[in-house]
Image (cartoon, rainbow, N blue to C red):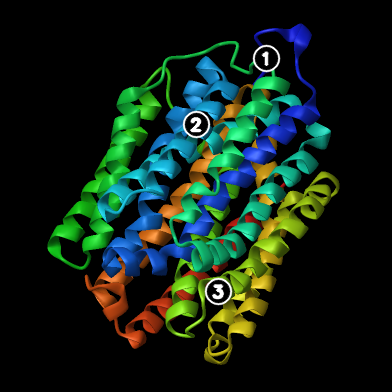
Amino acid sequence: MSPETSSLASEPSVLVALIAVCAGYLIAPMGLSAVNVAIPALALDLQASAAQVGWLPTVYILSSVMCFLPASRLADRYGRKRVFVYGLCVNGLAATVSSISSNMDVILLLRFVQGIAAAMIFGTGVAIVSSIVPAKKRGMALGIVASCVYVGLTLAPVAGGYLTEFMGWRSVFWFQVPLIVLLLVYIAIKLPGEWKDSETHAVDWLGTAVFALFSCLFVLGMAQLPSWYGVTTVCASFGALWLFIYLQIHTETPLIRVQMFRENRLFSLSLTSSLFMYGSNFALLFLLSVYLQFIHNLSPSQAGNILLFQALSMAIMAPVAGKLADRFASRVVATIGCSIVAVGLFLLNIPLIMAEPWWIGLALLILGIGFGLFSTPNNNSIVSSVTKAEIGVASAAMNLGRTVGNLIGMSVVNTMIHIIIGDVPIESASLDDIANTVELALMLSLGMVLCACIASGARGR
C-alpha cells in the first residue's frame, strides 16, 4: 500500500517513524502484562470472584478483536499516524481512570476500552513500518518492532510485581501514563506528515457489527459452557461468523478480502499457525501468575521475576529471527520456533517442573526462545505474501489472527475456571482446583502448538 503523506517534501525519516512505532509497541504490552501480575492483589482488594478475575484479560482481548479490522480501515482512510495517536490517548485516559476506580465492573469496562485502544495502536504500527521500509530490509525492521513488544512484556512482570508489592495494584495502571504523554510529545515534534491509502474506501460498518456480534457471542457462550445456554450461544456465534464471511465476499468494500485466504496458501497457513501459537500463549502468563502466587505463595515481585524469562528470551531472539527471515526461508525458521515452543510447553506439563518455581522459569526461557524465532519470520511471511496494495489489510489480518487466537485461548480458560473453580471469591477457591485448571490449560496449550507446527511446516515457500 503506497504511503501517501500530507506533505511528501517533509516526509520523516524511517528511523524517527520506527522509534515512534516501537515506543508505542513497548508501552502497550507493558500495560497489559503488568496488570496480569497485579490481578491477585486487585481481586483480593475488591473482593472479585474467580469469574471476574478471568474476565480482566478477556474483555481486553475481546474489544481488540472486535476493533482491529475497522481500526485498520479507518487508518487507511484518515491516516495511520492519526489513529495510532488516538489509540495512545484513549489508552492513557482509560489507565488513568482505572487507577482511581474502586468498582470491579468499572475496571472491566475500562479494560474493554483499553482493548479498543490496543487495536488502534497495533492495527496501524506494522502498516506504517511496512509502508516506509524497503522490502529487502522489512524482516529486520519487523524484528525490531517485535523485539520492542517483547521488551515491554519483559519489563512488565518485573515492574508490575514491584509496583504492586510496594505501591499497590493501582500503580500498574497509572505508571504507563507519563510514558504515553512523552511519546505523544515526541510524535508531535518529530513525526510530521501522514500515511494513508491513496484509494480510500468507506468502512464496512455492517460487517464490523456482525463481527463484533460473533466475538461477543463466542466469549459469552464459552463462559457458560457446558450449559444449554452456553452451547446455544456458541452455535449462534458461528452463525454470525458465517454471515460475516458471506458479507465480506459480497460487499464492494470489505473489511478484509476473504478470497485472500483461498488464493494465497502462504498467507492463510501463516495466519493459521499464528492463531494457534498465540492461542496457546495468551492465558499462560495470567495463569502462571495466579499459580505462583497462590500455589507457591510467592510475592508479586517474585512471580514477576520468574515470568520475565519468557519475554526476555523473546526480546533477545526477535531481532536475530528478523535477520534470519531476510536470509533464509521464513517457513523453516518459524517452524523451528514452533518446535522449540512445543518443547517448553512439554516441560511445563511435567509435574516435577511445576513443583519448582525456578524450573518454571527455565521452561519459560525455552518457550520464549521458540516464540522469538517464530513471530518475526511468520509476520514477514504474511506481509511479504501479498501485493503492496494489500499490506494494510495483511497487517490487520496478522494482528487479527494473533488476537483471535488470544481470544479463543482465554475463552477456553474462562470455561475451565467456570467449570472447575466456579463463581467464588478467588481467595476462597480450592488450591487443588486452581492447580487442576492450570494443568489442564497447559495440556491444551501444548496441543495448540503442535497444530501450529503442522500448519507452519505445510505452508511451503
Mark 2, residues whose alpha carbon is within 10 Å: few (<14), some, or many (≥20)? Answer: some
- Label 1: state its secondary structure: loop
The answer to which of 202 and 19 lies nearer the viewer is: 19
Report the residue at 64% width, 83% height from top. Answer: 358
Give the mark nearest the N terminus, 1 or 2. 2
Relative to 180, say whether 44 is above or below.
Answer: below
Measure the alpha-carbon separation of dots 3 and 2. Answer: 30 Å
Q: Callout 3, which amino acid?
A: Ala
Report the residue at 78% width, 51% height from top. Answer: 319
The answer to which of 369 and 459 lies nearer the viewer is: 369
- Label 3: state its secondary structure: helix
Instruction: Spot the residue most to the bottom.
Output: 352
Q: Callout 2, which amino acid?
A: Cys
Which residue does the numbered mark 1 point to in the structure image?
193
Residue 237 is situated, as x and y percent measured from the top left of the image, at 26, 47
Q: Are marks 3 and 2 in contact (CB under 8 Å)?
A: no
Give the mark nearest the N terminus, 3 or 2. 2
Residue 129 is situated, as x and y percent measured from the top left of the image, at 70, 31
Q: Callout 1, which amino acid?
A: Gly
Relative to 399, say whether 456 is above or below.
Answer: below
Which residue does the numbered mark 3 point to in the structure image?
303
Residue 131 is situated, as x and y percent measured from the top left of the image, at 69, 25
Left or right, residue 117 beside residue 393: left
Instruction: Spot the residue most to the right.
Output: 327
Report the residue at 25% width, 74% height from top. Answer: 419
Relative to 83, say whether 39 is above or below.
Answer: below
- Label 2: state its secondary structure: helix
Report the residue at 72% width, 57% height from top. Answer: 315
- Res. 99 in view: yes
Measure the alpha-carbon separation of dots 1 and 2. Answer: 19 Å
Left or right, residue 164 beside residue 98: right
Which residue does the numbered mark 2 point to in the structure image?
89
